[in-house]
């Protein structure tokens, strides 16, 4: 389970783990861009994104039941959300591991500026004003969650 704010490097690490482990990677942002384009500021963005994550979890559950490793590149900003997905995996007999990418806010904003200049087909463009809201909503994992 990838945990971190936008621009922290979650998808980059998830892709590396995908190759290294032969796991199946699920990245909602990729599906979201394909289905809805660049809509980070759209009023229905969060609902659309949640539906993508729900669909991807259904796929993940099916794979986990078959013993296939899955990388959830969801961000998992709250402890409640992390605990929920950990519990779901446990019910399926799967072990979980958190990969927390802790990057200082100033560096995230620098990365955001660079990222937002890339091709909109390759990255999700996030307005700087939304990034500051992300900072407020994110709950840093505690040490107990990292085991």
Image: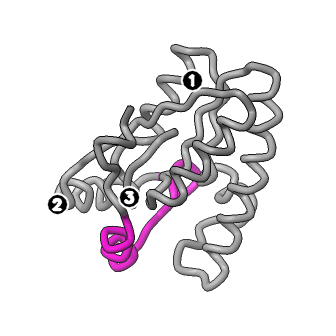
Q: Residue at x 43, y 46 (%)?
A: 3
Mark 2 falls on what kind of element? Answer: helix
Mark 3 falls on what kind of element? Answer: loop
Residue 18 is tagged as 1
Q: Residue at x 36, y 76 (%)?
A: 133
C-beta proximity under 8 Å, tags 1 and 2 = no
User: What x and y, as percent, mark residue 83?
Assistant: 53, 51
Q: Measure the alpha-carbon separation of dots 1 and 2.
A: 28 Å
Tell me, yes or no, whether the highlighted magenta stretch contains residue 87: no
C-beta proximity under 8 Å, tags 3 and 2 = no
- Please state the extent of the stretch shown in magenta in the rendering: 119-138
Circle nearer the N terminus (3, 2) = 2
Mark 3 or 1, closer to the camera: 1
Q: Measure the alpha-carbon separation of dots 3 and 2.
A: 18 Å
In the displayed structure, does residue 92 sit left or right of residue 26? Answer: right
Q: Residue at x 43, y 42 (%)?
A: 10
> In the picture shown, does residue 46 fall above or below 80?
below
Tell me, yes or no, whether the highlighted magenta stretch contains residue 134: yes
User: What x and y, as percent, mark residue 9?
Assistant: 37, 42
C-beta proximity under 8 Å, tags 3 and 1 = no
For disc 3, the marked residue is 117
User: What x and y, as percent, mark residue 64?
Assistant: 74, 29
For disc 2, the marked residue is 106
The crowding category of the residue bearing disc 3, from other C-alpha atoms within 10 Å (few below 14, some 14 to 19, many at least 20), is few
The crowding category of the residue bearing disc 2, from other C-alpha atoms within 10 Å (few below 14, some 14 to 19, many at least 20), is few
User: What x and y, as percent, mark residue 85?
Assistant: 61, 47
């Amino acid at each position: 389970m990838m945990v971190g704010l936008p621009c922290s490097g979650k998808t980059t690490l998830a892709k590396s783990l995908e190759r290294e482990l032969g796991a199946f990677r699920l990245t909602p942002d990729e599906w979201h861009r394909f289905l809805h384009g660049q809509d980070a500021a759209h009023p229905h963005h969060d609902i659309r994104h949640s539906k993508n994550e729900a669909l991807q979890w259904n796929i993940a559950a099916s794979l986990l039941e078959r013993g296939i490793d899955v990388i959830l590149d969801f961000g998992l900003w709250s402890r409640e959300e992390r605990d929920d997905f950990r519990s779901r995996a446990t019910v399926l007999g799967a072990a979980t591991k958190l990969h927390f990418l802790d990057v200082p806010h100033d560096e995230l904003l620098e990365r955001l500026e660079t990222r937002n200049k890339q091709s909109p087909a390759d990255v999700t463009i996030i307005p700087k004003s939304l990034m500051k809201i992300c900072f407020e909503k994110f709950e840093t994992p505690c040490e107990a969650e990292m085991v």
